[in-house]
Image (cartoon, coloured by chain):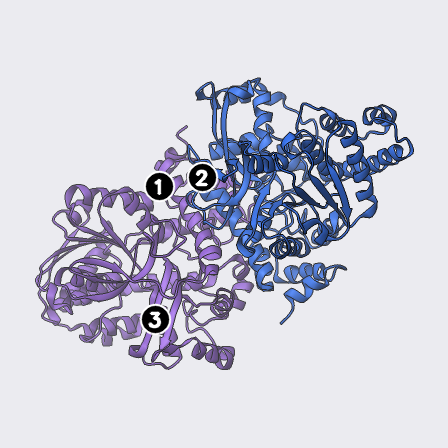
Chain colours: A blue, B purple
C-alpha cells in the first residue's frame, strides 16, 4: 500500500478527472493519496473539485484534493503527473480548421492519411507540443523520479517527443484498444475466454491476435460480417468499430483496425461528407465529419454545462447525494453516454476503463496487470525504429513495464503500408517542431493531395501563423 | 586472364551493346570471350552484330559473337547475363500513359512521388517484371553459377524482386552516379582529387560525401549556386544535375540528389508542363515532360535508324572504316550526343562509363575497382530493410563485392522523407506482382493525389488490363 501524489494537468475535463477519482476510490492500495487538480479554467476546476470531493465523501474513500492553476504545484512532490490538457482548447482547433478549409484543406491541414482524428493536430499544434516538453522539463527539474503519463493528444507525437528529448519516465495512454471489447460483445463471446493482442502506434493499432477458447476467432468475425454487417447502423458518430470502413480495412490489411484506427484511414474514405457517410454510416459520416465533430463538440459543451450545474446543486444542497442529482437533473442530461458514464463512475464495482490508476497501482503495489500503452519501440515491432513510440500490450508490476512479444507479428501490409507512412508524418511534425524549419511544414503540405500550388501552402501557413496565440510559433518558424 | 561467355538480352539497343563491346575490346583480361547478342527484333540485332563485328575487326580485338532470338541461348554456358530488354518497348509505355492521361493521371499512373522517370514503370509493367523473373529462373536452372546483371528498368524493383525470389548472383547497374562527375566538371575541380560517395536506391541516390583535397567541397558547390546558378540553362532535357530543382532538393535534404534522382522529386515540381519548365528549365521542362520525353523518343528512333543505316553501309562497303562512316553519314547523325557517343566508343583510350565489363573484369581477373551498384542493403544504410536493394559504392575483386561504409551517413531527411516512401511504393508494386492481388494496385492509386474517385481507379486499371499483350496480367489480377 502506497500513498502518492498524483497531479492531473487539464483537470477541468470533468469526465476524465472523475473517472480517475472514481478509479482511485476503487483502488484500496492507493488509499490516502493526494490528487492535485490543475487547470487554467478556474470555474471548471472548481466544479470538478466539488464533484470529486462529493464523490469521495459518498463512497467513504480516503483521498485528499488540492486545486491549482499553477503547473508547478501539480508537479512538485508528485509521483505521477497525468497530462490531459489541450492548449487553446477546441477553439484553437476550429480556428485552424476554418483557415485550412478556406484554402482548400477539407477538415484542416492536420487531417492526413492515417491521421483523420479531428483533435489530433500535429503540425499546427505548436503550443500543445511545446506544453508537453515544458511539463516534461519541469518534471525533470522538480520531481525527477515522477512518471509522466501522456493522455493528451496527439499521444503518438507527444510521447515520442517527450521520450526522445527529456530523460524522465514517460508513458502514453489511450483507451482505443477497448474497441476489441466492442467486437467481442458484438460477436457474443465471453471476454474472459478471448485471447487478444493489438499492436501499432497510437490511433493505428491492429488486432494481430484474436483467439477464442484456444482457436482462431477471426472466422467468427467473418461470419458476423457475412451475416450481419449489412444491418449495421452506428449508434453515435464514434460507433465505427464494425463499420464498412473497418471491414474494408480488415479485408485489405488482413487484421482488424481497432478503436480510433478505424477513423485513421486514407482519403478514399474521407474525401467529402458523402464519402464519409458511405463508409462511416449515416447520418453522421463518423466522428470526423463536419456533422459528427459538431455532435461531439456539442456533447462536450453540454457535459461542461451539466458539470457546472451539478456542482452548483451540490454546493447549494450539501446533503444531496450524487444519485439524487441524477434524478433531479435527469431531464437536462445531454446524451445517453453521459448518463452511462455517470452510472459507471458511481458504480462501486466497475472501473472507468482508463488505465492510469490501475497502472500506478500495478507499479507501486505490485498489482500486476495488463495494459495497452505507448512506449518507445525498442524492437517490439520489427521494422519500426527503436525510438518511435508504439502502442503495445505490456504487463506492469513493481519491476516496471514488460512489453509482450507481438505474436503473431503484425502483417507486413500493416507495417509497410500503414504504420510507416504514418510514422513519417510524425517524424516531419517533430522535426519541424524541434528545429523551427518551416520548410518541413511546407514539404508536409506539398505532399498533401489537396495542395494545388505553392501559393496555397504559403497562404494557409501564413494565416495560421498570424493567429492570436501563435506569436511564439510564428517566431519559431520565421526566425530567419 | 579469363575468357567468358556474356549474354546480352535486349542487345538490339545499339548504343548500349556497342558500349559493352567497346569496353570488352579495351579490357585485355577478357580477350577471347564470347558475346551472345539476344533480341527478339531480328533487324536491330543484325545491325548491332554487323557494327560490333566491324568494330572488333578494326581494333583487332579477339571477341566472338553469337546472335539469337532465343533467351535460352543467351543463358546456356553464360558466365554473365546482362539484361537490358524492355518488354513491349516504348510502344507499351506510351499506350499505358495515354490511357492514364485519359483518366486524369498526367504522365501515367506509374509516375509517382520520387518516381517520375518516364520509362520506369512499376505497377503497370507486369510483363517486364515477369521477364526479369523468367530470366533469373532460367539462369538458376541452366547456368546456376552465372551472374545476372540487371540493366533494364525498373532497376530498383527488378533487382529487389530477383534477389528476393531467385537464388542466383544478381546485381543491378545504372550510370546515374556519373552525375557526380557533372558537378565536378561544372565546379572546375580535378576529379582525381575529389573524394565522393553516393548512397540511396536506384534513381534515388544522394551525395553523402563530397570532399576536395581533403576538405568539405560543398562550400564550393554553394559558391557556384550563389554566383552561377542564375545563368544555368539546360543543354538537353536530361541536363538537370544543376537545375533549380536539384538545388532546391539539396537545400531541403542537405545533400545533392545525383543523376536521375533529380527527376524523381515530388509533384510540387511536376504538376504540369509549366511547373516542370520552371524547375527543370526551358524549353523542355526536363526529360519527363511531354516535350522532353518526345525529344528522347525521337532521338532513340533516330539512333535506331542511323544504326541500321550504318550497318547497311558497312555490309555494302566491307572495307570501309567506322570513322569513314561517320564522315559519310555525318549529315544524318541525329544529335550531338550520338556523335559524342560514337567518338567515345571509337576512342581506344576511353571506356564507355557503363560498369558491366569493368565489373566482370574486377571479379574474374581481380582487377579491383570501385563501382556504384545495386545489391540488397543488409545493413549498409541503417533504417532500411535488409532485403531492399540499395545503390551504393562498393569495391569488387576476385573475392566478390565489398560495400563501402556509408560515411558520413545519409541525412535523416533523405532516409525518412525520401527513401522510405519510395521504398513503400516498391514494396506495393512487388507484392502486387507476386500475389496478383489487384487491391494493392488499387490501394496504390487510392493514395495517388490525382485520384478523385474509386471509379477512376477501376476504369484506368480495367483499360490497362484490357490492352493487347496484357492478357496474362489481366488473368493474374482478375483470377478470383
Q: Chain of mark 2?
A: A
| Relative side of A190 to B143, left or right | right
Q: Which mark is residue B469?
A: 1
Q: Secondary structure at mark 2?
A: helix
Q: CA distance from mark 1 to mark 2?
A: 30 Å
Q: Position of residue A135 (x, y in %)?
A: 65, 53
Point out residue B37 in the picture as x, y percentages from the top left corner: 18, 55
Read off the residue under disc 3.
B196
Residue A349's disc number: none
Q: Tell me: residue B163, above or below residue B266.
A: above
In the image, residue B466 above or below residue B177 = above
Q: Where residue A236 sits: x, y (%)?
A: 70, 30
- Label pair 3/2, CB-CB below 8 angstroms: no
For the N terminus of chain A, the image quarter is top right
A111 left or right of A416 in image? right
Q: Nearer the viewer, residue A371 or A222?
A: A371
Disc 1: CA contacts within 10 A as few (<14), some (14-19) or many (>=20)? few
Q: Chain of mark 3?
A: B
**Badge 1 and badge 2 in a common chain:** no
Instruction: Please give the residue where the numbered disc 2 appears in the rendered image.
Output: A413
How far, Cα to Cα, is label 3 from label 2? 37 Å
Front residue (pair B326, B72): B72
Say whether marks 1 and 2 touch (CB < 8 Å).
no
**Residue A248 location in percent, x, y?**
54, 32
Q: Left or right: A480 with respect to B466?
A: right
Which label's residue is closer to the chain start, 3 or 1?
Answer: 3
Quadrant in the picture for the C terminus of chain A:
bottom right
Amino acid at each position: 500500500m502506497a500513498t502518492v501524489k498524483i497531479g492531473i494537468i487539464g483537470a477541468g475535463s470533468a469526465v476524465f478527472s472523475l473517472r480517475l477519482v472514481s478509479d482511485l476510490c476503487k483502488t484500496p492500495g492507493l488509499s490516502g493519496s493526494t490528487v492535485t487538480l490543475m487547470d487554467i479554467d478556474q470555474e471548471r476546476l472548481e466544479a470538478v473539485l466539488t464533484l470529486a470531493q462529493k464523490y469521495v465523501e459518498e463512497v467513504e474513500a480516503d483521498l485528499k484534493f488540492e486545486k491549482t492553476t499553477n503547473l508547478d504545484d501539480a508537479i512538485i512532490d508528485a509521483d505521477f503527473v497525468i497530462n490531459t490538457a489541450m492548449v487553446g482548447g477546441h477553439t484553437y482547433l476550429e480556428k485552424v480548421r476554418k483557415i485550412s478549409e478556406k484554402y482548400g484543406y477539407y477538415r484542416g491541414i492536420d487531417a492526413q492519411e492515417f491521421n483523420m482524428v479531428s483533435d489530433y493536430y500535429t503540425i499546427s499544434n505548436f503550443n500543445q507540443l511545446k506544453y508537453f516538453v515544458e511539463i516534461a522539463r519541469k518534471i525533470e527539474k522538480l520531481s525527477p523520479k515522477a512518471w509522466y503519463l501522456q493522455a493528451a493528444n496527439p499521444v503518438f507525437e507527444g510521447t515520442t517527443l517527450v521520450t526522445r528529448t527529456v530523460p524522465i519516465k514517460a508513458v502514453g495512454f489511450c483507451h482505443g484498444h477497448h474497441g476489441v471489447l466492442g467486437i467481442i460483445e458484438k460477436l457474443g463471446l465471453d471476454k474472459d475466454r478471448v485471447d487478444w493482442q493489438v499492436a501499432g502506434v497510437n490511433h493505428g493499432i491492429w488486432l494481430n491476435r484474436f483467439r477464442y477458447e484456444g482457436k482462431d476467432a477471426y472466422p467468427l468475425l467473418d461470419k458476423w460480417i457475412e451475416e450481419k454487417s449489412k444491418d449495421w447502423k452506428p449508434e453515435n458518430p464514434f460507433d465505427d468499430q464494425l463499420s464498412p470502413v473497418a471491414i474494408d480495412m480488415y479485408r485489405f490489411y488482413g487484421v482488424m483496425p481497432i478503436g480510433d484506427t478505424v477513423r485513421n484511414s486514407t482519403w478514399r474514405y474521407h474525401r467529402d461528407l458523402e464519402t464519409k457517410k458511405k463508409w462511416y454510416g449515416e447520418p453522421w459520416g463518423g466522428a470526423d465529419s463536419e456533422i459528427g465533430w459538431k455532435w461531439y463538440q456539442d456533447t462536450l459543451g453540454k457535459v461542461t454545462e451539466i458539470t457546472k450545474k451539478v456542482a452548483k446543486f451540490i454546493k447549494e444542497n450539501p446533503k444531496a447525494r450524487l444519485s439524487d442529482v441524477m434524478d433531479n437533473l435527469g431531464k437536462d442530461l445531454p446524451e445517453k453516454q453521459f448518463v452511462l458514464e455517470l452510472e459507471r463512475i458511481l458504480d462501486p464495482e466497475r472501473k472507468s476503463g482508463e488505465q492510469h490508476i490501475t497502472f500506478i497501482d500495478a507499479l507501486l503495489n505490485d498489482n500486476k496487470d495488463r495494459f495497452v500503452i505507448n512506449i518507445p519501440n525498442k524492437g517490439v515491432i520489427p521494422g519500426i525504429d527503436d525510438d518511435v513510440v508504439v502502442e503495445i500490450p505490456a504487463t506492469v508490476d513493481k519491476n516496471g513495464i514488460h512489453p509482450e512479444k507481438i505474436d503473431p507479428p503484425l502483417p507486413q501490409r500493416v507495417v509497410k503500408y500503414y504504420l510507416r507512412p504514418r510514422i513519417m508524418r510524425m517524424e516531419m511534425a517533430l522535426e519541424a517542431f524541434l528545429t523551427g524549419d518551416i520548410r518541413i511544414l511546407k514539404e508536409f503540405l506539398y505532399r498533401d493531395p489537396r495542395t494545388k500550388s505553392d501559393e496555397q501552402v504559403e497562404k494557409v501557413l501564413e494565416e495560421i501563423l498570424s493567429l492570436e496565440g501563435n506569436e511564439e510559433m510564428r517566431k519559431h518558424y520565421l526566425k530567419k
